[in-house]
Amino acid sequence: METHDPLKEGEKGAWVSIVAYILLAAFKIGMGYTTGSEALTADGINNSTDIIVSLAVLIGLRISRKPPDRDHPYGHRRAETIASLVASFIMAAAGIQVVLQACKSFFVTDRQAPDLLAAWIALGCAVVMWGVYTYNSRLAKRLNSQSLKAAAYDNRSDALVSIGAA
């Protein structure tokens, strides 16, 4: 008989984020260069760093599943908390980078408007990330997973950044 393991189920959410970020990062970077949109390219690069956040969550969930041993008589559940902390620091650093890049762009005067297609791509990607956020948020609530909740917040912020890029 197979037992229900909420941490294993939580790994699905991390994998959904990883796959979404890989596909969206490649698509946004490629289309950013094609359309001449620095905002779309920067958003794609931001998604590339988000892969690290999702990997941290995945690793934290995997370590948390380990049973108690001699060195950890109460188990490894705190690994999920550490993964949440790592994810939070990475999100904060990425947010600061986005703000600095936006401030720097105010001083550039010789710019051409990118193709309007870039805005539609960014909006479409925002919808995809909002879907990933909704999935992970519901999964985190059902499993009571703090690291998956942190990943969901990162998904939501990425959807909002894509709207800003549009």
Image: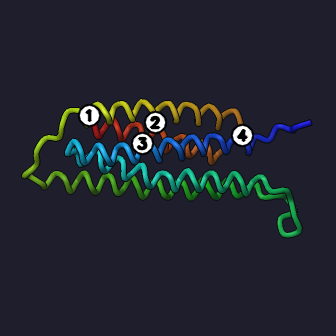
- Few, some or many C-alpha atoms within 10 Å of disc 1 (few <14, some 14-19, many ≥20)? many
Question: Residue at label 3?
Answer: 24
Question: Residue at label 1?
Answer: 119
- Which of the numbered marks, if any, corresponds to residue 64? none
- Whole-Å distance between the Cαs marked 4 and 1? 35 Å
Given the image, on which type of amino acid does mark 1 rest? Answer: Ala
Q: Earlier in the sequence, mark 2 or mark 3?
A: 3
Given the image, on which type of amino acid does mark 3 rest? Answer: Leu
- Whole-Å distance between the Cαs marked 2 and 3? 9 Å
Given the image, on which type of amino acid does mark 2 rest? Answer: Met
Mark whose residue sits in front, 3 or 4: 3
Residue at (22%, 54%) from the top-left corner? 103
Given the image, on which type of amino acid does mark 4 rest? Answer: Glu
* Residue 17 spot, x, y in % from top left: 54, 43
Quadrant holding the C terminus: top left
Q: Are marks 3 and 4 in contact (CB under 8 Å)?
A: no
Question: Residue at label 4?
Answer: 9
Question: Residue at label 2?
Answer: 129
Q: Give the quarter of the image for residue 40.
A: top left
Taking the view exactly as shown, the residue that stands out farthest to the bottom is 71
- 147 vs 30, left or right, is right
